[in-house]
Amino acid sequence: MSYSTSLPPMLVAGPLSSVSGPNAWVYKEAATFDVIRAANYITNALALGMKIGDMILHWDVTSASSPVLTLGRVTNVTSSGATIAATGTPIV
């Protein structure tokens, strides 16, 4: 499956203190974490307000009976899109 700007990641939490810090995003797609961590996969990341250091929870719903939740980190944001850290670890 390819990324659709009509179903973007959703911002669920801003910085957890009064100083600038990472945001938390949730993204649900029937695609593995390896797919979404491709360079510039989230093509409208800059417009969404994503920034380096933001956290992203990816909910892979490829298998309805055993979905996988993976935590990643935004490592690059350009006008072409965002890149997610390759170090994501499934947590469910």
Image: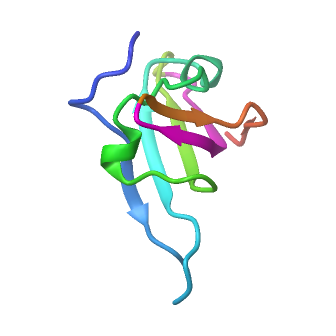
**Which residue extends farthest bottom?**
18
Find residue 6 and report its image quarter: top left
Whether residue 60 is situated above or below residue 49 in the rendered picture: above
Q: Residue furthest front?
A: 79
In the drawing, does residue 76 fall left or right of residue 77? right
Q: How is the image coloured?
A: rainbow
Q: Residue furthest left?
A: 6
> Residue at the spot x=62%, y=36% of the render?
84
Q: Camera-side residue: 29 or 54?
A: 54
Q: Quadrant of the C terminus?
A: top right
**Quick check: 51 above or below 23?**
above
Q: Which quadrant of the structure image shows residue 13?
A: bottom left
Residue at the image position 38 percent from the left and 54 percent from the top: 49
- Number of labelled discs? 0
**Residue at image coords 40%, 61%:** 12
Of the pair 90 and 4, the residue shown nearer to us: 4
Q: Reply above or below: 20 against 64.
A: below
Name the spot of residue 40 as percent of width and height, x first.
50, 26
Q: Position of residue 51 (x, y in %)?
A: 51, 54
Most frequent secondary structure within the magenta stretch: strand
Give yes or no for residue 77 being in the magenta stretch.
yes
Task: Pinpoint residue 22: horizontal percent, then vertical percent.
Answer: 57, 65
Magenta highlight range: 65-79
| Residue drawn at (38%, 56%) of the image | 11
Estimate the x, y position of residue 90 in percent, counting from the top left: 72, 36
Specify whether 37 is left or right of 18.
right
Magenta run includes residue 71:
yes
Quarter of the figure with the N terminus: top left
